[in-house]
Every structure is written in structure tokens, then in C-alpha cells.
Amino acid sequence: MRALLVPALLALAVTPALAEPTARVKGGNIAVRTGSGMEYGIVGRIPDGTEVTLDYCTRNDRWCFVTDTGWVDASWLVGWSAKIRATPPDFSGPGW
């Protein structure tokens, strides 16, 4: 029983890192907006090279919400796998 408990606890310790996808800003000081589109106001900027944590991205991966910051144009983020992990699944299709 004890032999099973240790690997299970180690798996739990790794899970939070997987739950918080990160990406890096590439290409300049990108605008942070109040919504997921160019029509929304700019509330700040994130410097080039900054690593950010993504809460979620739109289904087409055009915009991502940076944790505690706001929306950014996803084309300025490097870390495609992070954007995919942050994108919620589409439950609107058949079977859902």
C-alpha cells in the first residue's frame, strides 16, 4: 500500500504546474486590453521577453487572457502548447 501512496503524492505535486500554462512575450511591448479584440481599451503593456501565465485563450487562439492582467493578442506570445492547454474545450457539438 505504501508503495502506491508515494507515486500518487508525487503525481499530485506535479499537477499544479500543468494547470498553469505559460508563454513568453515576443516582439515588443504588447498592449493589454479590457477585452478580446482590438476595439477594447488598452489598460497596460507587457515588456518583450516577459513570461506570463495564461488563464485561457479564445477557441481560434487569437486572444489570450493573462492571469490578473487582461487580454493580449496571442500572435505576440511564444509557447503554442501553452495556448492550446489554456483553450477551453468546445462542448457545443454533438454529444454534449
Image (spheres, rainbow, N blue to C red):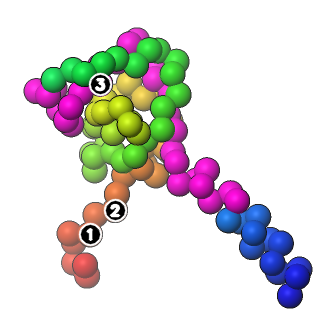
Residue type at mark 1: give it. Answer: Phe
Decide which of tag 3 and tag 2 comes sooner along the chain.
3
| Residue that label 2 marks | 89
Identify the mark at residue 91; answer none if there is no mark: 1
Give the residue at x 21% y 20%: 42
Estimate how packed mark 1 is, as few (under 14), some (14 to 19) or many (20 or more) residues with alpha carbons within 10 Å.
few
| Residue that label 3 marks | 32
Residue type at mark 2: give it. Answer: Pro
Give the residue at x 25% y 78%: 96
**Quadrant assignment, res 7:** bottom right
Helix, strand or loop at label 2? It is: loop
The question of residue 39 being in magenta is answered with yes
Horizontally, is 3 left or right of 84 in the view? right
Helix, strand or loop at label 1? It is: loop
The question of residue 41 being in magenta is answered with no
Q: Give the x, y percent position of residue 17.
A: 61, 50
- Is 71 situated above or below 15? above
Give the residue at x 53% y 28%: 51
Q: Give the x, y percent position of residue 71.
A: 29, 33
Could you say which is closer to the camera, residue 92 or residue 21? 21
Q: Give the x, y percent position of residue 34.
A: 21, 31
Q: CA distance from mark 2 to mark 1?
A: 6 Å
